Image: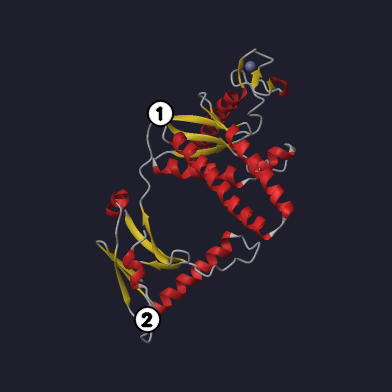
């Protein structure tokens, strides 16, 4: 939230700094946690870069929020700010739990920003609802077992364009080309994030479904699947959709499940015949029962069936565990 009062109240102070040991300790701890997180984020692969305007984190012990007055411990004194909460955030602001805040500084506009973090307990899980099988692929971002398609034509066209432009700029290699490259990478990421948000929101908001079954594709990356598919499987935008759908469904009391991905595209969803020849691109034609369907819908149906199979398996295992002691006792 940009706020004039925030800018003015952070003016450099000429007084000698007075900070209690307790406050200093908390601020140091917050800084340490920040540093550790950024190391974890890059998984120790490279040295994290320190930005000159990194954020300063506050938690409940170093700040207080009363109504719309926020008090921060700063060097020298406690700074009181009156927040200007937009109507859009009113509901969250009044009903959710306040956890902490981050103060950041933007060099260009010379403004301080306060980001407030709120927490909300997960809603209770829905009792009733169907299972939707979701198949993901190169040509459709995802498609559901009941025939909803999210085409990735537009995405592929955009990504091709970015790839081409990137190549051209990399060959040039001048300073301005590098600047353009950096701006471009941000734009491409935002484009993909927007699409992933839209698709996952539409999927999660379907009222008739409670569980979303997806293929577990984490283990099959290294198999012979072709260069294109492997590249797409390991891309961040691919896992981003999973992540978005996961948290959006939890917020609605729904859930996502990952199921066995083997043979989902080759098996007939009606008779179970598994044959590589069953599928020809987007057309699925079973050699055994002559069932014809779009191959992505067939995969979606198989994924849904795999979910039912695995959940039935878990249930029977649980029952076996419950029954075991009774059996041994009767002997
Ligand atoms: Zn069949």
What residue is drawn where x is 46% and y is 34%?
A: 203
Residue in view at x 40 percent, y 66 percent: 112
Q: Is residue 149 left or right of residue 60?
A: right
* Camera-side mark, 2 or 1: 2
Return the x and y of residue 24 as percentages of the image width and height.
41, 79
Circle 2 SS class: loop
**Which numbered disc covers residue 13?**
2
Residue bearing mark 1: 208
Is label 2 in contact with label 1 (beta carbons under 8 Å)? Answer: no
Q: Residue at x 58, y 46 (%)?
A: 188
Q: Is residue 313 above or below residue 72?
A: above
Q: Ligand 1 shows up in which quadrant of the image? A: top right
- Relative image position of residue 292 (x, y in whole percent): 62, 15
Disc 2/disc 1 C-alpha distance (Å): 59 Å
Q: Nearer the viewer, residue 30 or 84?
A: 84
Q: Please give the name of the residue rendered at 62% of the width and 54% of the height, measured from the top-left corner.
A: 180
In front of the other: 329 or 236? 236
For the image, the number of numbered tags is 2
Q: Considering only order in the chain, which callout, 1 or 2, is on the residue closer to the N terminus? A: 2
């Amino acid at each position: 939230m940009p706020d004039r009062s925030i800018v003015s109240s952070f003016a450099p102070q000429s007084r000698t700094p007075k900070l209690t040991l307790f406050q200093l300790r908390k601020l140091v701890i917050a800084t340490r946690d920040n540093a550790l997180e950024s190391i974890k984020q890059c998984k120790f692969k490279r040295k994290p870069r320190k930005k000159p305007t990194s954020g300063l984190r506050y938690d409940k012990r170093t700040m207080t929020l009363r109504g719309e007055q926020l008090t921060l411990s700063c060097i020298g004194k406690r700074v009181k700010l009156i927040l200007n909460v937009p109507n859009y955030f009113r509901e969250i602001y009044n009903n959710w739990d306040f956890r902490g805040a981050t103060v950041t500084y933007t060099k260009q506009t010379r403004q301080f920003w306060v980001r407030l973090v709120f927490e909300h307990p997960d809603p209770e899980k829905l009792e009733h609802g169907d299972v939707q099988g979701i198949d993901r692929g190169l040509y459709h971002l995802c498609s559901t077992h009941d025939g909803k398609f999210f085409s990735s034509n537009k995405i592929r066209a955009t990504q091709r364009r970015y790839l081409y432009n990137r190549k051209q700029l990399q060959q040039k290699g001048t300073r301005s080309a590098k600047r353009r490259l950096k701006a471009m990478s941000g734009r491409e990421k935002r484009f993909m994030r927007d699409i992933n948000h839209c698709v996952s929101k539409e999927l999660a908001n379907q009222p008739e479904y409670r569980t979303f079954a997806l293929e577990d594709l984490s283990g099959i990356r290294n198999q012979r699947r072709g260069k294109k598919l492997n590249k797409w499987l390991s891309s961040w935008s691919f896992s981003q959709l999973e992540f978005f759908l996961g948290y959006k469904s939890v917020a609605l009391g729904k859930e996502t499940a990952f199921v066995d991905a083997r043979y989902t595209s080759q098996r007939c969803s009606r008779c179970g015949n598994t044959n590589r020849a069953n599928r020809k691109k987007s057309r699925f034609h079973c050699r055994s029962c002559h069932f014809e369907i779009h191959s992505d819908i067939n995969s979606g149906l198989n994924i849904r069936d795999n979910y039912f199979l695995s959940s039935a398996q878990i249930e029977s295992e649980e029952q076996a565990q419950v029954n075991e002691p009774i059996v041994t006792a009767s002997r």
